[in-house]
Amino acid sequence: MNEIRGRFGAATYRIAIVVSRWNELVTKELLAGALDELKGLNAEVTVVHVPGTWEIPVAVRAMLAQKPHGVVALGCILQGQTPHAQLLGGDVGGALMGLQTETGVPIAWGILPPDNQDQALDRAGLKFGNKGREAARAAVEMADVLAQIKG
């Protein structure tokens, strides 16, 4: 049986992070977690700051021209913040999935859709770990899985 699993530290991967400034109290913590994780994985990192989550897909598309091995999308869409939060999350998620499947470059989802700021902070490093850190690790793992599949 042949088995492929992501290996950490097997190579140095170029990872782009696209992070929203909207809800910056939360997104700065997601970014800090992602950067800390990628430093430990010896990744080369480029960070792109955008105004909000809505702008993440277009910045990711532009970064894909730089040929990163993976991308980490970081943002926070508070459900109570706007009446169109579910629509925004669905549109952004669909756009990122389309870019990922079209290009074959993994785009890790680090966009929080919490009901309130307390839930967001809990997922940005307080009670439930740091989802930015988890997304960064997923991007590197998928970059390595795809490198192995491609040979």
Image (tube, grey):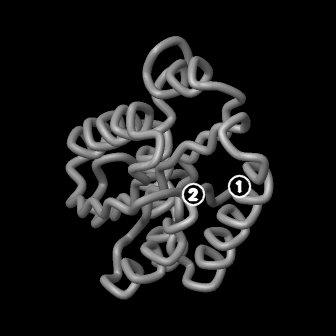
Amino acid type at mark 2:
Ile
Q: Write down the residue under mark 1.
A: 89
Above/below status of 96 relative to 39: below
**Quarter holding residue 27:** top left
Left or right, 146 with reference to 102: left
Q: Residues within 10 Å of mark 1 (few under 14, many from 20)?
A: many
Circle on res. 4: 2
Viewer-proximal residue among 65 and 89 = 89
Q: Residue at x 27, y 43 (%)?
A: 35
Q: Residue at x 40, y 54 (%)?
A: 19
Mark 2 and mark 1 lie on one chain; the one further toward the N terminus is: 2
Q: Residue at x 51, y 35 (%)?
A: 131
Left or right, 97 with reference to 141: right
Above/below status of 135 relative to 16: above
Viewer-proximal residue among 118 and 137 = 118
Element under label 2?
Answer: loop
